[in-house]
Image: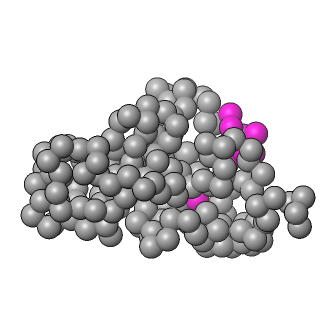
Amino acid sequence: MDHADITPAPGVLLIAPPLLADPNFRRSVVLLCEHGEDGSFGLILNRPMTIQPAEVLDDFYGYDEPLSLGGPVEPNTLHYLHRHGDVIPGAIRVFDGVYWGGDFEAVRTLTASGGASTGDLRFFLGYAGWSPGQLDAEIDAGGWFLARAREAAIFPRDPDRLWRDVLRSMGREYALLANFPDDPRMN
C-alpha cells in the first residue's frame, strides 16, 4: 500500500516519526475520529495508565482494564472506543467495526452485565485535538505518518509495542524506522 495516498479522515492512524520531540506525542499512535473544517479530534492508542474506570466513575462495574491517556486536551473528559455500535445509541462509526462514544448509560449497562470486554471497549481520559488546518500543516511538515487503522491497533494486546508494530505493518522504510533507537545519541 502506498501510504502517500492516505489523507486525514476518520479511521486513519497518525504515527509519530521517531524524532518527534513533543512529549505529548512522542512515539504515539493516534486514531483520528473526526477531521473536517472545524478541526480534528483523535485518541492516542498507546498511552496506558494505571487508573481503573471505577476510580473515576461512580457506580461503574464489570470492567477493570486501566484507562488510557487519550491526549493532552481536556484530560478530565472521558471518551471511549468500542465494537458495539449496534447496542450503544448515538455511537459514531469511525471505520468498519469500530465506534466512538454514544449513550454512556448503555455502556454502563453493557459493562455491568458482562457484555463488554477489554477486547471490544477502551476508555480514554483527554483527547488529541487540532484547530482547523493545524493537522494538515503538521502532516505537510513531516510531523506525522499516516496509515489506515485496523481493529488490532484499536484494541491491542500490548499498547507499549503498538508504535513499533504499526510501523512494521506499513512495510518498507517504515519498518526500518520501527527499530530506531529511543535516543540516537546512545546508539
Q: Can residue 31 be seen here?
A: no
Q: How many numbered callouts? A: 0
* Residue 144 is a magenta residue: yes
Tell me the quadrant of the picture where the C terminus can be found.
Answer: bottom right
Tell me the quadrant of the picture where the N terminus can be found.
Answer: bottom right
What segment is highlighted magenta in the picture?
137-147
Which residue occupies 65% across, 55% down? 27
Which residue occupies 58% across, 59% down? 147
Residue 155 as seen in the image, left or right of residue 182: left
Above or below, comparing residue 141 to residue 98 in the picture: above
Residue 17 as seen in the image, left or right of residue 129: right
Above or below, comparing residue 135 to residue 171 in the picture: above
Quarter of image, res 65: bottom left
* Residue 79 is a magenta residue: no
Q: Position of residue 157 (x, y in %)?
A: 45, 73
Which residue occupies 64% across, 68% down? 164
Residue 71 as seen in the image, left or right of residue 107: right
Which residue occupies 68% across, 34% down? 137
Q: Position of residue 109 (x, y in %)?
A: 10, 54
Q: Nearer the viewer, residue 8 or 27?
A: 27
Q: Can residue 114 be seen here?
A: yes
Q: Position of residue 133 (x, y in %)?
A: 60, 29
Q: Position of residue 176 (x, y in %)?
A: 77, 71
Way the structure is coloured: one colour
